[in-house]
Image (spheres, helix red, strand yellow):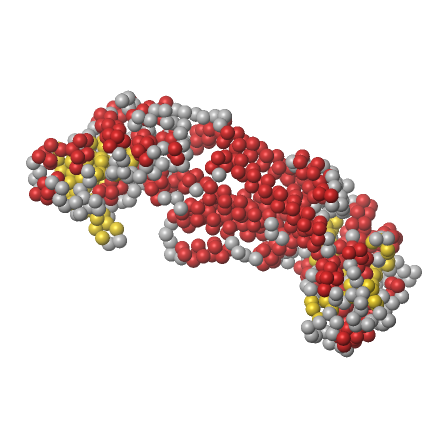
């Protein structure tokens, strides 16, 4: 599989990860996450596991900077991301990519979807010029092709999203998140609707991204997947992190009894 | 390029050409150097087509653009009150008098007269064929409760109709008396379909004669009939003290209407070969004074 | 007196020069073209303005929570059914020489007609757009956001995703505008120059005029022209839309 790489990724290999520091968050008065402290580092795949409904999605969304946490801080280095101005935070957001459980593709060609990240980063004049060029002819870009290769859809650029199967769509969603060279990639149950073949493609792409220096976070309730792809595992139960550690350790010798029960298939709710 | 893009470009070019066509008329729109006059007229006058003849002549003689706005009598006078028109043309004497007495208009002049006729279904259920006067005809229609269709819209025609009912002492009430709320042409057509009697401007009747199965039973003064069916047209200038009216041009218009050129056009204007308007603006004994309606009128 | 060579589509000119549909058309050269032109100019301009206002409003209302939101939505929907005569009167009172905007000299002009049709079309465009954009799933909007889009980017994506519904909204607004007669008659005055070219006469007010004079067949003929015009516009929009329909 082609190596997804750009010089920027390697340049940033010294930059720090994201730190959730004592983060709590809830909706409508109900607490969903309580006192989470977690680091996301570059060049590793962190899998957040736990039964459905324990707050994995909320955790991912907080990392994606959708909302500010009710309490606690989200830091990059020493910078509290929510004390930044909107523009500064926009710059931070642009270093993050995300794949949802649903592909959530735009109703356009695969090409348009994957190049979205690049498009929104252009200045207005460049965007108008691109729009004008679009009217008179297709403009494909090498980055789009490269990224599609990572998910095994190198020939799909001109296809419309309507013609994609579920698995293909999710792979395009992955390419879309990757195309603008983010430093962190967040995935929320990315393969729960996919067949084994497409799941394998995604997992392979995750590995490729990690190898390129991205910090990958995957939320899943699939234990086997966690074992396959995680460098580190964080166990989330009832909104609390009950265990964090390297995959081997957590699976063979968990500290918390509940972790063992979860690995054994209980506590699934 | 893809079919979709071609379609887009074709669509955009068609739209662009069409809109360019629309906007292209902008230049033709500015009023001539000598000015613009907005004249409010009643629909029956407008529909007779007389104004096309008059206004083309006025425009070519004086180079002033005329904007003729038609409406019901009430609407036309209201426009004069608001100053949305510069000159008002009507044929409802009592309403015109009120207009002037309230200070909305000045310098009223007669410029033509026509007349009304009373028409109805050929089988004449009210038996008014031999009747000479309008008020007697109305009495008979009321007595026989024959279907009657009124304009019902405070137009000059309607105002005249009401005056005749007052004279006749019969009361226009009952299922046989209906109000259309429509213009003269539509009212004629409805009366035709329903076999109803009506009072109508002679010009409009002539205009639609071929499609109507209605006979004239009571003639107006133009053919020597009942003077109560007279239909005098007046032109009034909107009071320049109240509104921003180009008074000179307005008076130019009035002068044109009541002068030789205008009066000749009026005299020669025919509908279906028949003269409909009779000029009375010129007089051997002209009265240039301001017309002030007396309180009894 | 005034040059009336049409600059618009050639087809309209040749169509109406001949005796159209075997009916003796008692119109001067260029009459029908000029009223078509006025109809298009007024209604297209009004709808474009309505869209420029209505679309952002639809997005704002659709995706923000605020007190009184339900009332606003109800108002928008009510606005779709405003009687055109009432709107015409309200605009007339505004632009009349006696009214607050009297000094702008707008009474009996095409500009006043555009204003009144704008008032009529905006609720339609806004309401239907609102329905269209709120159907767009949150997930897609989230994706646009998380991929590094600003709120404007998300709005543009929403518009793009809802484009079919928005086109429907604009066409509905255009239909409302181009086929109404009550407001343009009152604020425009149905004016035509002595040479037969229209100043403020549209297809609809021309139809009304013919009907008032009892010339029903001509009124129907003009009605046919109006319907054909709307069909052509819809056809153009379909072409632009490509295979999405």
Q: Residue A191 appears at what percent x and percent y?
A: 25, 36
* Residue B166 appears anywhere in the view: no
Q: In screen coordinates, is A22 left or right of C107?
A: left
Q: Residue C108 appears at what percent x and percent y?
A: 66, 51
Q: Residue at x 72, y 64 (%)?
A: B194
Q: Residue C123 appears at what percent x and percent y?
A: 50, 51
From the image, which quarter does the N terminus of chain C lie in?
top right
Q: Quadrant of residue B237?
A: bottom right
Q: In screen coordinates, is A65 left or right of B62?
A: left
Q: Quick one: A257 or B56, which is closer to the camera?
A: A257
Q: Quick one: C186 or A81, which is closer to the camera?
A: C186
Q: Quadrant of residue B135?
A: bottom right
- Compared with B79, A25 (above or below) is above
* Residue A157 appears anywhere in the view: yes
Q: Residue at x 50, y 35 (%)?
A: C242
Q: Residue at x 16, y 33 (%)?
A: A227
- Compared with C245, B247 (above or below) is below
- Compared with A201, B174 (above or below) is below
Q: Residue B47 appears at what percent x and percent y?
A: 75, 55
Q: Residue furthest front?
A: B123
- Compared with A103, B174 (above or below) is below
Q: In screen coordinates, is C209 left or right of B201?
A: left
Q: Quick one: B243 or C64, which is closer to the camera?
A: C64
User: What number of labels is visible?
Assistant: 0
Q: Residue at x 38, y 49 (%)?
A: C64
């Amino acid at each position: 599989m082609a190596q997804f790489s750009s010089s920027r990724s390697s340049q940033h290999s010294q930059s720090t990860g994201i730190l959730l520091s004592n983060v709590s968050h809830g909706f409508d008065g109900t607490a969903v996450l309580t006192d989470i402290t977690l680091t996301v580092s570059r060049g590793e795949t962190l899998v957040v596991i736990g039964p459905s409904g324990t707050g994995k999605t909320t955790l991912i969304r907080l990392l994606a900077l959708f909302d500010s946490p009710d309490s606690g801080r989200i830091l990059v280095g020493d910078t509290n991301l929510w004390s930044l101005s909107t523009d500064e935070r926009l710059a931070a957001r642009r270093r993050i990519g995300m794949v949802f459980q649903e592909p959530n593709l735009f109703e356009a060609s695969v090409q348009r979807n994957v190049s979205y990240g690049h498009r929104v980063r252009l200045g207005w004049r460049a965007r108008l010029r691109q729009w004008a060029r679009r009217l008179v002819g297709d403009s494909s870009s090498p980055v789009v092709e490269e990224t599609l290769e990572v998910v095994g859809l190198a020939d799909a650029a001109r296809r419309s999203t309507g013609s994609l199967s579920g698995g293909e769509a999710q792979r395009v969603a992955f390419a879309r998140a990757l195309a603008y060279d983010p430093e962190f990639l967040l995935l929320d149950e990315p393969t729960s609707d996919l067949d084994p073949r497409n799941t394998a493609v995604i997992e392979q792409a995750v590995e490729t991204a990690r190898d390129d220096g991205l910090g990958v976070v995957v939320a899943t309730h699939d234990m086997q997947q966690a074992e396959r792809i995680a460098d580190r595992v964080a166990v989330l139960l009832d909104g609390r992190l009950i265990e964090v550690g390297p995959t081997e350790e957590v699976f063979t010798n968990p500290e918390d009894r509940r972790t063992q029960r979860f690995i054994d298939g209980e506590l699934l709710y | 390029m893809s079919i979709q893009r071609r379609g887009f470009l074709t669509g955009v070019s068609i739209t662009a050409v069409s809109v360019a066509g629309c906007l292209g008329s902008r230049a033709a729109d500015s009023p001539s150097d000598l000015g613009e006059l907005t004249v409010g007229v009643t629909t029956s006058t407008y529909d007779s087509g007389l104004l096309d003849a008059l206004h083309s002549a006025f425009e070519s003689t004086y180079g002033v653009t005329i904007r003729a706005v038609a409406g019901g009598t009430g609407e036309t006078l209201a426009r004069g009150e608001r100053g949305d028109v510069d000159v008002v043309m009507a044929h409802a004497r009592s309403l015109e008098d009120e207009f002037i007495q309230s200070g909305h208009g000045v310098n009223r002049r007669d410029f033509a007269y026509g007349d009304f006729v009373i028409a109805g279904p050929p089988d004449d259920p009210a038996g008014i064929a031999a009747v000479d006067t309008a008020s007697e005809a109305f009495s008979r229609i009321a007595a026989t409760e024959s279907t009657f269709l009124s304009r019902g819209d405070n137009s000059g025609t309607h105002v005249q109709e009401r005056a005749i009912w007052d004279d006749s002492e019969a009361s226009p009430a009952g299922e046989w008396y209906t109000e259309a709320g429509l213009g003269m042409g539509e009212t004629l057509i409805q009366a035709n379909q329903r076999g109803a009697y009506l009072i109508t401007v002679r010009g409009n009747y002539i205009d639609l004669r071929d499609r109507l199965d209605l006979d004239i039973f009571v003639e107006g003064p133009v053919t020597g009939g009942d003077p109560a069916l007279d239909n005098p047209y007046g032109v009034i200038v909107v009071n320049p003290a109240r509104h921003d009216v180009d008074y000179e041009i307005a008076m130019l218009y009035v002068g044109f209407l009541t002068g030789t050129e205008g009066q000749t056009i009026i005299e020669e204007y025919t509908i279906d070969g028949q003269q409909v308007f009779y000029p009375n603006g010129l007089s051997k004994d002209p009265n240039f004074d301001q017309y002030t309606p007396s309180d009894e009128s | 007196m005034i040059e009336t060579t049409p600059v618009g589509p050639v087809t309209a000119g040749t169509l109406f020069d001949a005796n159209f549909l075997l009916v003796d058309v008692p119109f001067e050269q260029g009459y029908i073209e000029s009223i078509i032109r006025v109809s298009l100019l007024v209604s297209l301009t009004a709808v474009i303005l309505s869209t420029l206002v209505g679309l952002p409003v639809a997005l704002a209302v659709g995706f923000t929570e605020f007190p009184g939101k339900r009332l606003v939505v109800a108002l928008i929907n009510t606005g779709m059914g405003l009687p055109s005569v009432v709107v015409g009167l309200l605009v007339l009172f505004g632009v009349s020489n006696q009214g607050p905007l009297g000094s702008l000299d707008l009474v009996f002009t095409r500009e006043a007609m555009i204003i009144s049709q704008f008032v009529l079309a905006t609720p339609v465009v806004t309401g239907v757009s609102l329905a269209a954009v709120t159907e767009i799933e949150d997930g897609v909007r989230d994706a646009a956001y998380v991929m590094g889009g600003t709120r404007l980017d998300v709005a543009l994506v929403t518009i793009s995703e809802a484009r079919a519904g928005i086109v429907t909204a604009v066409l509905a607004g255009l239909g409302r505008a181009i086929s109404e007669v009550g407001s343009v008659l009152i604020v425009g005055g149905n004016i035509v120059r002595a040479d037969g070219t229209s100043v403020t006469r549209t297809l609809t007010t021309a139809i009304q005029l013919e009907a008032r004079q009892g010339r029903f067949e001509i009124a129907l003929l003009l009605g046919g022209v109006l319907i054909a015009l709307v069909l052509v516009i819809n056809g153009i929009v379909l072409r632009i839309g490509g295979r999405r329909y």
